Image: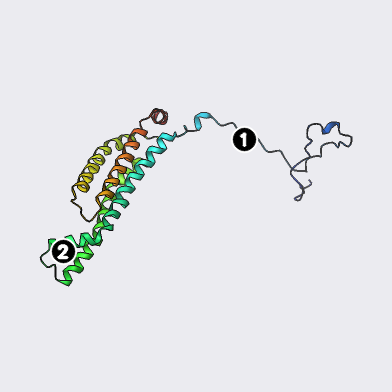
Amino acid sequence: MSEPDPFASPYHRVDLPGQANAPHHHPPAPLPPGYHPPVPMPPVDPRDVGPRRPVTTTVASWCWIAAAVLVVIVLPGLVYTGVDGLTAEILRDSADADDPAARTAAELGARITPALFALAFAVLSVPYLIAAVKLRSGRGWARIVLTVLAMPSAAFGIVMLLVFVSGSMPYVHWGLGVAWSCVFFGICAQGLVAMYLPASNAYTRSVTR
């Protein structure tokens, strides 16, 4: 039994339309020994292909992720920009304002405070992030969780807006705080509305069906 030539080309001659009537037409070259045409792939059952995720669901997911970033990173960053003012406020509240050790401790506390805020907000944002990621897969429970969590998010945004407007955080510029609150409200509202638009509803129903 002869072995197939390892250097033989697995391709055979292909004649383009109209070459059959050419004056120098050659018959198709035979296939190399031992070569078998590839078996065609079986057709894909449409039921095995999941529904396509609409843009509205993707937008809703990214909106909730962006809201978490605003709380975990941007808000503590605003507090950190006023670390000198926060240090002065801590010194005013202490009786040992002239003590160098007290000033050092106040500066350290002012720098640690934003990091503590970021850590606490990161822990609280875990349910938001998990639900936002699962929302992309059309999970109905993720949409319910985000709907329930939208209420404390709105309350938190209102509290922070009042704090910035009233000047309770003088070490943070009130304009930046109000802008942060407006952006936070807008992103949360867009995420809440986008995940209940008709395309998102149809996607969630098709996944849970």
Q: Residue furthest bottom?
A: 100
Residue ID for mark 1: 41
Placement of the N terminus among the 4 image quadrants: top right
Q: Mark 2 and 1 residues: CB-CB less than 8 Å, in contact?
A: no
Spot the residue most to the left: 95
Closest to the observer, 106 or 121: 106
The percent position of residue 204, horizontal first and vertical second, equals 39, 31
Give the amino acid at mark 1.
Met
- Residue at image point 28% right, 50% down: 176
Q: How is the image coloured?
A: rainbow
Q: Residues within 10 Å of mark 2 (few under 14, many from 20)?
A: many
Residue at the spot 14% in from the left edge and 67% down from the top edge:
97
Relative image position of residue 90 (x, y in whole percent): 17, 61
Q: Is residue 188 visible?
A: yes
Residue 124 shown left or right of residue 134 in the figure: left
Q: How much space separates mark 2 and mark 1, taking CA atoms?
A: 75 Å
Label 1 neighbour load within 10 Å: few <14, some 14-19, many 20+: few
Residue shown at 24%/40% (left/top)? 152
Helix, strand or loop under label 2:
helix
In the rendering, which numbered label is found on residue 91? 2
Mark with earlier residue (2, 1): 1
Q: Secondary structure at mark 1?
A: loop
Whether 184 is drawn above or below 116: the answer is above
Locate residue 22, reporting x and y percent: 86, 34
Picture quarter containing residue 110? bottom left
Where residue 139 sits: x, y (%)?
A: 37, 35
